Image: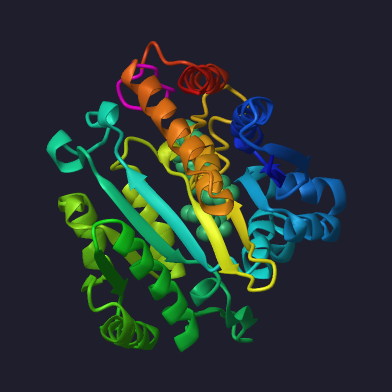
Amino acid sequence: MASYNLFLLPGDGIGPEVMTEVEKVANFLDQSGVARFEMDRGLVGGCAYDAHGQSISEADMEKAQAADAVLFGAVGGPKWDAVPYDVRPEAGLLRLRKDLALYANLRPAMCYPALADASSLKREIVENLDIMIVRELTGGVYFGEPKQIIDLGNGQKRGIDTQVYDTYEIERIGRVAFELARKRNNKVTSSEKRNVMKSGVLWNEVITALHKREYADVQLEHQLADSLGMQLVRWPKQFDVIVTDNLFGDMLSDIASMLTGSLGMLPSASLGDVDPKTKKRKALYEPVHGSAPDIAGQGLANPIAMIASFAMCLRYSFGLGEPADMIEKAIANVLDAGLRTADIKGSLPSHISTTQMGDAILAEVKKLS
Ligand code: NAD
Ligand code: IPM
Ligand code: MN
Protein backbone atom coordinates (compact mmCIF):
# COMPACT_ATOMS: atom_id res chain seq x y z
CA MET A 1 0.00 0.00 0.00
CA ALA A 2 1.28 3.47 -0.86
CA SER A 3 2.49 5.50 2.08
CA TYR A 4 2.43 9.29 2.28
CA ASN A 5 4.03 11.70 4.66
CA LEU A 6 1.63 14.52 5.60
CA PHE A 7 2.99 17.51 7.47
CA LEU A 8 0.22 19.23 9.44
CA LEU A 9 0.49 22.92 10.30
CA PRO A 10 -2.78 23.78 12.08
CA GLY A 11 -1.70 27.34 12.98
CA ASP A 12 -3.86 29.76 14.96
CA GLY A 13 -7.49 30.55 15.77
CA ILE A 14 -9.86 28.11 14.08
CA GLY A 15 -6.92 26.44 12.23
CA PRO A 16 -6.44 23.70 14.86
CA GLU A 17 -10.23 23.23 15.18
CA VAL A 18 -10.72 22.49 11.48
CA MET A 19 -7.51 20.44 11.24
CA THR A 20 -8.77 18.03 13.91
CA GLU A 21 -11.69 17.17 11.63
CA VAL A 22 -9.35 16.42 8.71
CA GLU A 23 -7.26 14.13 10.88
CA LYS A 24 -10.34 12.02 11.59
CA VAL A 25 -10.97 11.53 7.87
CA ALA A 26 -7.28 10.82 7.12
CA ASN A 27 -7.11 8.30 9.98
CA PHE A 28 -10.19 6.52 8.67
CA LEU A 29 -8.77 6.30 5.12
CA ASP A 30 -5.53 4.98 6.63
CA GLN A 31 -7.30 2.32 8.69
CA SER A 32 -9.51 1.27 5.81
CA GLY A 33 -6.49 0.64 3.58
CA VAL A 34 -6.84 3.47 1.03
CA ALA A 35 -3.24 4.52 1.75
CA ARG A 36 -0.95 4.90 4.72
CA PHE A 37 -0.78 8.44 6.03
CA GLU A 38 2.15 9.24 8.31
CA MET A 39 1.19 12.47 10.04
CA ASP A 40 3.67 14.80 11.67
CA ARG A 41 2.75 18.18 13.16
CA GLY A 42 4.50 21.54 13.38
CA LEU A 43 3.91 25.13 14.42
CA VAL A 44 3.24 28.06 12.11
CA GLY A 45 2.02 31.60 12.65
CA GLY A 46 1.36 33.22 15.99
CA CYS A 47 1.72 29.97 17.93
CA ALA A 48 5.20 29.48 16.42
CA TYR A 49 6.10 33.07 17.32
CA ASP A 50 4.97 32.44 20.91
CA ALA A 51 7.05 29.25 21.05
CA HIS A 52 10.31 30.48 19.53
CA GLY A 53 10.01 34.03 18.18
CA GLN A 54 9.70 32.98 14.49
CA SER A 55 6.57 32.49 12.42
CA ILE A 56 7.97 29.12 11.36
CA SER A 57 11.15 27.40 12.57
CA GLU A 58 13.93 26.11 10.31
CA ALA A 59 13.19 22.57 11.52
CA ASP A 60 9.55 22.87 10.47
CA MET A 61 10.55 24.40 7.12
CA GLU A 62 12.72 21.33 6.51
CA LYS A 63 9.82 19.04 7.37
CA ALA A 64 7.58 20.97 4.99
CA GLN A 65 10.20 20.63 2.24
CA ALA A 66 10.48 16.88 2.84
CA ALA A 67 6.77 16.10 3.14
CA ASP A 68 4.69 14.55 0.37
CA ALA A 69 2.15 17.27 1.15
CA VAL A 70 1.59 20.00 3.72
CA LEU A 71 -1.85 20.56 5.23
CA PHE A 72 -2.19 24.12 6.51
CA GLY A 73 -4.96 25.48 8.77
CA ALA A 74 -4.82 29.28 9.19
CA VAL A 75 -2.63 31.88 10.83
CA GLY A 76 -2.96 35.27 12.48
CA GLY A 77 -5.02 37.11 15.03
CA PRO A 78 -5.19 40.31 17.06
CA LYS A 79 -2.85 38.86 19.71
CA TRP A 80 0.04 39.32 17.27
CA ASP A 81 -0.94 42.72 15.82
CA ALA A 82 2.11 44.38 17.35
CA VAL A 83 4.82 41.80 16.56
CA PRO A 84 7.61 42.88 14.17
CA TYR A 85 6.58 42.72 10.49
CA ASP A 86 9.12 40.05 9.52
CA VAL A 87 7.91 37.57 12.11
CA ARG A 88 4.18 38.28 12.00
CA PRO A 89 2.05 35.11 11.66
CA GLU A 90 1.30 35.67 7.96
CA ALA A 91 5.03 35.73 7.17
CA GLY A 92 5.21 32.01 7.97
CA LEU A 93 2.66 31.23 5.28
CA LEU A 94 4.34 33.49 2.74
CA ARG A 95 7.69 31.83 3.43
CA LEU A 96 6.21 28.37 2.91
CA ARG A 97 4.73 29.45 -0.43
CA LYS A 98 7.94 31.12 -1.61
CA ASP A 99 10.51 28.59 -0.38
CA LEU A 100 8.51 25.62 -1.64
CA ALA A 101 7.95 27.49 -4.94
CA LEU A 102 4.18 26.95 -4.78
CA TYR A 103 3.36 29.33 -7.59
CA ALA A 104 -0.03 27.91 -8.61
CA ASN A 105 -2.91 28.39 -6.21
CA LEU A 106 -6.07 26.61 -7.31
CA ARG A 107 -9.18 27.98 -5.63
CA PRO A 108 -12.33 26.21 -6.83
CA ALA A 109 -15.65 27.87 -6.01
CA MET A 110 -18.44 25.35 -6.28
CA CYS A 111 -21.97 25.88 -5.12
CA TYR A 112 -23.22 22.63 -3.62
CA PRO A 113 -26.87 22.11 -4.70
CA ALA A 114 -28.13 22.23 -1.10
CA LEU A 115 -26.58 25.67 -0.62
CA ALA A 116 -28.08 27.41 -3.65
CA ASP A 117 -30.26 29.46 -1.30
CA ALA A 118 -27.47 30.12 1.20
CA SER A 119 -25.54 32.54 -1.00
CA SER A 120 -26.11 36.24 -0.62
CA LEU A 121 -27.02 36.12 -4.33
CA LYS A 122 -30.17 34.70 -5.89
CA ARG A 123 -30.47 30.94 -6.49
CA GLU A 124 -30.46 31.22 -10.31
CA ILE A 125 -27.17 33.11 -10.22
CA VAL A 126 -25.24 30.52 -8.19
CA GLU A 127 -27.03 27.20 -8.70
CA ASN A 128 -24.61 24.59 -10.14
CA LEU A 129 -21.77 27.11 -10.17
CA ASP A 130 -18.36 25.51 -10.67
CA ILE A 131 -15.49 27.89 -11.35
CA MET A 132 -11.77 27.62 -10.76
CA ILE A 133 -9.70 30.64 -9.79
CA VAL A 134 -6.02 30.14 -10.59
CA ARG A 135 -4.09 32.62 -8.50
CA GLU A 136 -0.38 33.29 -9.06
CA LEU A 137 1.10 32.80 -5.59
CA THR A 138 4.83 33.53 -5.44
CA GLY A 139 5.17 36.83 -7.30
CA GLY A 140 3.55 40.21 -7.77
CA VAL A 141 3.15 42.84 -5.11
CA TYR A 142 3.38 40.26 -2.31
CA PHE A 143 7.08 39.71 -2.95
CA GLY A 144 8.33 42.49 -5.27
CA GLU A 145 11.23 44.68 -4.12
CA PRO A 146 11.52 47.33 -2.82
CA LYS A 147 9.02 46.68 -0.08
CA GLN A 148 9.57 49.15 2.71
CA ILE A 149 8.52 52.21 4.66
CA ILE A 150 10.99 55.06 4.33
CA ASP A 151 11.19 58.16 6.44
CA LEU A 152 11.16 61.23 4.20
CA GLY A 153 12.55 63.37 7.00
CA ASN A 154 9.83 66.04 6.80
CA GLY A 155 7.41 64.36 9.14
CA GLN A 156 6.23 62.22 6.25
CA LYS A 157 6.82 58.56 5.57
CA ARG A 158 6.44 56.59 2.33
CA GLY A 159 5.11 53.05 2.17
CA ILE A 160 6.29 51.13 -0.88
CA ASP A 161 5.20 47.81 -2.34
CA THR A 162 6.30 46.79 -5.79
CA GLN A 163 4.34 44.80 -8.35
CA VAL A 164 6.77 42.75 -10.45
CA TYR A 165 6.13 39.96 -12.95
CA ASP A 166 8.60 38.30 -15.29
CA THR A 167 7.59 36.52 -18.48
CA TYR A 168 8.32 33.04 -17.10
CA GLU A 169 6.10 33.61 -14.06
CA ILE A 170 3.12 34.63 -16.19
CA GLU A 171 3.72 31.87 -18.69
CA ARG A 172 3.86 29.05 -16.13
CA ILE A 173 0.67 30.15 -14.34
CA GLY A 174 -1.03 30.60 -17.72
CA ARG A 175 -0.08 27.05 -18.62
CA VAL A 176 -1.67 25.75 -15.41
CA ALA A 177 -4.88 27.60 -16.25
CA PHE A 178 -5.05 26.39 -19.88
CA GLU A 179 -4.33 22.77 -18.87
CA LEU A 180 -7.08 22.88 -16.25
CA ALA A 181 -9.52 24.44 -18.72
CA ARG A 182 -8.93 21.59 -21.17
CA LYS A 183 -10.16 19.15 -18.50
CA ARG A 184 -13.12 21.38 -17.61
CA ASN A 185 -15.21 23.63 -19.89
CA ASN A 186 -12.34 24.80 -22.08
CA LYS A 187 -12.49 28.50 -21.25
CA VAL A 188 -9.93 30.79 -19.57
CA THR A 189 -10.56 34.35 -18.47
CA SER A 190 -7.31 36.19 -17.81
CA SER A 191 -7.47 39.22 -15.58
CA GLU A 192 -5.17 42.17 -14.86
CA LYS A 193 -5.31 45.96 -15.04
CA ARG A 194 -3.38 46.64 -18.24
CA ASN A 195 -5.11 50.03 -18.42
CA VAL A 196 -3.02 51.31 -15.50
CA MET A 197 -0.26 48.78 -14.79
CA LYS A 198 2.81 47.84 -16.84
CA SER A 199 2.80 44.40 -15.26
CA GLY A 200 -0.78 44.10 -16.52
CA VAL A 201 0.33 44.96 -20.07
CA LEU A 202 2.99 42.24 -19.91
CA TRP A 203 0.57 39.76 -18.31
CA ASN A 204 -1.89 40.29 -21.15
CA GLU A 205 0.80 39.96 -23.85
CA VAL A 206 2.30 36.79 -22.41
CA ILE A 207 -1.05 35.03 -21.90
CA THR A 208 -2.18 36.03 -25.42
CA ALA A 209 1.05 34.72 -26.99
CA LEU A 210 0.95 31.47 -24.99
CA HIS A 211 -2.62 30.93 -26.06
CA LYS A 212 -1.82 31.48 -29.72
CA ARG A 213 1.26 29.26 -29.60
CA GLU A 214 0.06 26.29 -27.53
CA TYR A 215 -3.59 26.54 -26.50
CA ALA A 216 -5.55 27.92 -29.44
CA ASP A 217 -8.17 25.19 -28.86
CA VAL A 218 -9.11 26.81 -25.53
CA GLN A 219 -11.42 29.83 -25.51
CA LEU A 220 -9.57 32.83 -24.04
CA GLU A 221 -10.95 36.15 -22.93
CA HIS A 222 -9.45 39.06 -21.01
CA GLN A 223 -11.26 41.10 -18.36
CA LEU A 224 -9.93 44.00 -16.34
CA ALA A 225 -9.80 42.95 -12.69
CA ASP A 226 -12.22 45.55 -11.34
CA SER A 227 -14.79 44.66 -13.96
CA LEU A 228 -14.24 40.96 -13.32
CA GLY A 229 -15.12 41.54 -9.66
CA MET A 230 -18.39 43.04 -10.82
CA GLN A 231 -19.05 40.19 -13.29
CA LEU A 232 -18.38 37.63 -10.54
CA VAL A 233 -21.42 38.83 -8.64
CA ARG A 234 -23.49 39.73 -11.73
CA TRP A 235 -23.28 36.46 -13.67
CA PRO A 236 -20.56 34.13 -12.34
CA LYS A 237 -21.58 31.22 -14.56
CA GLN A 238 -19.92 32.96 -17.54
CA PHE A 239 -16.59 31.80 -16.05
CA ASP A 240 -14.80 28.47 -16.15
CA VAL A 241 -11.14 29.10 -15.23
CA ILE A 242 -10.00 32.56 -14.12
CA VAL A 243 -6.25 33.23 -14.10
CA THR A 244 -4.92 36.27 -12.32
CA ASP A 245 -2.12 37.68 -10.21
CA ASN A 246 -1.40 37.24 -6.51
CA LEU A 247 -3.31 40.23 -5.12
CA PHE A 248 -6.29 40.21 -7.50
CA GLY A 249 -6.55 36.43 -6.96
CA ASP A 250 -6.66 36.91 -3.20
CA MET A 251 -9.50 39.40 -3.42
CA LEU A 252 -11.48 37.71 -6.17
CA SER A 253 -11.43 34.35 -4.38
CA ASP A 254 -12.85 35.84 -1.17
CA ILE A 255 -15.60 37.41 -3.32
CA ALA A 256 -16.21 34.06 -5.02
CA SER A 257 -16.57 32.36 -1.65
CA MET A 258 -19.85 34.14 -1.06
CA LEU A 259 -21.23 32.58 -4.25
CA THR A 260 -20.87 29.20 -2.53
CA GLY A 261 -22.64 30.16 0.70
CA SER A 262 -19.70 30.84 3.01
CA LEU A 263 -15.99 31.57 3.14
CA GLY A 264 -15.89 28.39 5.25
CA MET A 265 -16.64 26.36 2.08
CA LEU A 266 -13.64 27.25 -0.11
CA PRO A 267 -10.64 24.89 -0.28
CA SER A 268 -7.38 25.47 -2.10
CA ALA A 269 -4.30 23.73 -3.44
CA SER A 270 -0.94 25.49 -3.75
CA LEU A 271 1.25 23.60 -6.20
CA GLY A 272 4.81 23.74 -7.47
CA ASP A 273 6.31 22.07 -10.54
CA VAL A 274 6.81 18.32 -10.77
CA ASP A 275 10.47 17.54 -10.02
CA PRO A 276 11.77 15.69 -13.12
CA LYS A 277 14.03 13.50 -10.94
CA THR A 278 11.70 12.46 -8.12
CA LYS A 279 8.49 12.89 -10.18
CA LYS A 280 7.02 14.50 -7.09
CA ARG A 281 5.71 18.02 -6.69
CA LYS A 282 5.73 20.18 -3.61
CA ALA A 283 2.24 21.03 -2.48
CA LEU A 284 0.38 22.72 0.34
CA TYR A 285 -3.37 22.49 0.90
CA GLU A 286 -5.20 25.16 2.83
CA PRO A 287 -8.67 26.62 3.18
CA VAL A 288 -9.10 30.07 1.64
CA HIS A 289 -10.37 31.48 4.94
CA GLY A 290 -8.25 32.84 7.77
CA SER A 291 -8.02 32.16 11.49
CA ALA A 292 -11.44 33.78 12.17
CA PRO A 293 -10.52 35.24 15.59
CA ASP A 294 -14.14 36.36 16.06
CA ILE A 295 -15.36 32.76 16.36
CA ALA A 296 -12.22 30.88 17.45
CA GLY A 297 -12.54 28.47 20.37
CA GLN A 298 -16.33 28.36 20.23
CA GLY A 299 -16.92 25.31 18.05
CA LEU A 300 -18.48 27.54 15.38
CA ALA A 301 -15.95 27.04 12.57
CA ASN A 302 -17.06 25.31 9.40
CA PRO A 303 -14.53 22.52 8.73
CA ILE A 304 -15.69 21.90 5.13
CA ALA A 305 -13.05 24.11 3.45
CA MET A 306 -10.29 22.26 5.31
CA ILE A 307 -11.76 18.81 4.64
CA ALA A 308 -12.28 19.67 0.96
CA SER A 309 -8.64 20.87 0.86
CA PHE A 310 -7.63 17.37 1.99
CA ALA A 311 -9.74 15.96 -0.87
CA MET A 312 -7.73 18.19 -3.25
CA CYS A 313 -4.56 16.80 -1.68
CA LEU A 314 -5.66 13.23 -2.40
CA ARG A 315 -6.49 14.17 -6.00
CA TYR A 316 -3.58 16.41 -6.94
CA SER A 317 -0.71 15.03 -4.86
CA PHE A 318 -1.48 11.32 -4.60
CA GLY A 319 -3.65 10.59 -7.64
CA LEU A 320 -6.35 9.24 -5.30
CA GLY A 321 -9.27 10.58 -7.31
CA GLU A 322 -11.84 8.11 -6.00
CA PRO A 323 -11.42 8.83 -2.29
CA ALA A 324 -11.34 12.54 -3.15
CA ASP A 325 -14.66 12.25 -5.01
CA MET A 326 -16.01 10.26 -2.07
CA ILE A 327 -15.16 13.01 0.42
CA GLU A 328 -16.80 15.64 -1.79
CA LYS A 329 -19.87 13.42 -2.17
CA ALA A 330 -19.97 12.97 1.63
CA ILE A 331 -19.92 16.77 2.05
CA ALA A 332 -22.75 17.11 -0.50
CA ASN A 333 -24.82 14.42 1.27
CA VAL A 334 -24.38 16.00 4.69
CA LEU A 335 -25.48 19.37 3.30
CA ASP A 336 -28.41 17.68 1.50
CA ALA A 337 -29.44 16.25 4.87
CA GLY A 338 -29.79 19.83 6.12
CA LEU A 339 -26.77 19.91 8.43
CA ARG A 340 -25.22 23.39 8.66
CA THR A 341 -22.57 25.16 10.70
CA ALA A 342 -23.49 28.64 11.92
CA ASP A 343 -21.73 30.52 9.10
CA ILE A 344 -24.18 29.17 6.51
CA LYS A 345 -27.27 31.29 5.93
CA GLY A 346 -30.44 29.68 7.21
CA SER A 347 -28.61 27.51 9.76
CA LEU A 348 -29.89 29.32 12.83
CA PRO A 349 -31.07 28.39 15.38
CA SER A 350 -30.37 24.70 14.75
CA HIS A 351 -26.78 24.85 13.56
CA ILE A 352 -24.27 22.15 14.48
CA SER A 353 -20.73 22.51 15.83
CA THR A 354 -17.39 22.06 14.07
CA THR A 355 -17.00 18.61 15.64
CA GLN A 356 -20.53 17.55 14.75
CA MET A 357 -19.99 18.61 11.13
CA GLY A 358 -16.66 16.72 11.00
CA ASP A 359 -18.28 13.63 12.54
CA ALA A 360 -21.22 13.80 10.12
CA ILE A 361 -18.88 13.97 7.11
CA LEU A 362 -16.78 11.10 8.51
CA ALA A 363 -19.90 8.98 9.06
CA GLU A 364 -20.93 9.65 5.46
CA VAL A 365 -17.45 8.79 4.16
CA LYS A 366 -17.70 5.48 6.06
CA LYS A 367 -21.10 4.80 4.49
CA LEU A 368 -19.82 5.53 0.99
CA SER A 369 -16.63 3.47 1.28
P1 NAD B 1 -11.06 35.40 8.12
O1 NAD B 1 -11.13 34.60 6.88
O2 NAD B 1 -10.30 34.82 9.24
O3 NAD B 1 -12.55 35.70 8.61
C1 NAD B 1 -13.48 36.48 7.85
C2 NAD B 1 -14.92 36.19 8.36
O4 NAD B 1 -15.29 34.88 7.89
C3 NAD B 1 -15.04 36.15 9.87
O5 NAD B 1 -16.28 36.67 10.24
C4 NAD B 1 -14.98 34.68 10.22
O6 NAD B 1 -15.66 34.32 11.39
C5 NAD B 1 -15.61 34.04 8.99
N1 NAD B 1 -15.04 32.71 8.72
C6 NAD B 1 -13.85 32.46 8.14
N2 NAD B 1 -13.64 31.14 8.07
C7 NAD B 1 -14.71 30.54 8.61
C8 NAD B 1 -15.06 29.17 8.83
N3 NAD B 1 -14.28 28.15 8.46
N4 NAD B 1 -16.23 28.92 9.43
C9 NAD B 1 -17.05 29.93 9.79
N5 NAD B 1 -16.78 31.23 9.61
C10 NAD B 1 -15.60 31.53 9.03
O7 NAD B 1 -10.46 36.82 7.71
P2 NAD B 1 -10.04 38.06 8.66
O8 NAD B 1 -10.94 38.14 9.84
O9 NAD B 1 -9.91 39.18 7.74
O10 NAD B 1 -8.59 37.68 9.15
C11 NAD B 1 -8.31 37.12 10.43
C12 NAD B 1 -6.84 36.72 10.48
O11 NAD B 1 -6.62 35.64 9.61
C13 NAD B 1 -5.88 37.83 10.04
O12 NAD B 1 -4.77 37.77 10.90
C14 NAD B 1 -5.49 37.43 8.62
O13 NAD B 1 -4.22 37.86 8.26
C15 NAD B 1 -5.53 35.94 8.74
N6 NAD B 1 -5.76 35.23 7.48
C16 NAD B 1 -5.06 34.08 7.35
C17 NAD B 1 -5.26 33.30 6.25
C18 NAD B 1 -4.50 32.04 6.14
O14 NAD B 1 -3.91 31.63 7.12
N7 NAD B 1 -4.49 31.38 5.01
C19 NAD B 1 -6.20 33.68 5.26
C20 NAD B 1 -6.92 34.86 5.45
C21 NAD B 1 -6.69 35.64 6.59
C1 IPM C 1 -4.97 33.97 1.79
C2 IPM C 1 -4.60 34.97 2.86
C3 IPM C 1 -3.11 35.27 2.78
C4 IPM C 1 -2.86 36.01 1.49
C5 IPM C 1 -2.51 36.03 3.97
C6 IPM C 1 -2.85 35.44 5.28
C7 IPM C 1 -1.00 36.10 3.82
O1 IPM C 1 -5.39 36.10 2.77
O2 IPM C 1 -4.36 32.90 1.72
O3 IPM C 1 -5.92 34.21 1.05
O4 IPM C 1 -3.02 37.24 1.43
O5 IPM C 1 -2.46 35.36 0.53
MN1 MN D 1 -7.04 35.89 1.36
Coordinates of residue 355 in the picture (x, y in percent): 57, 20
Q: Residue furthest front?
A: 1
Q: Vertically, is 92 above or below 80?
A: below
Which residue is rendered at x = 86% and y = 51% of the image? 52
The image quadrant that residue 358 belongs to is top right
> In the drawing, does residue 156 fall left or right of residue 184?
right
Where residue 197 appears, x then y in whole percent? 35, 84
252 up-or-down from 41: above or below: below
Residue 203, picture quadrant:
bottom left
Residue 76 is at least partly visible in this image: no
- Residues shaded magenta: 338-347
Is 24 left, or right, of 310 in this rendering? Answer: right
Residue under the image location 54 percent in, 30 percent down: 295
Determine the residue located farthest toward the left in the rendered image: 124
Is residue 130 left or right of 41 when viewed as pictured?
Answer: left
x 23%, y 54%: residue: 232
Q: Is residue 272 left or right of residue 187?
A: right
Residue 228 in percent (x, y) is at: 24, 63
Residue 283's place in the image compared with 167, above or below, is above
Q: Which picture quadrant has residue 54? A: bottom right
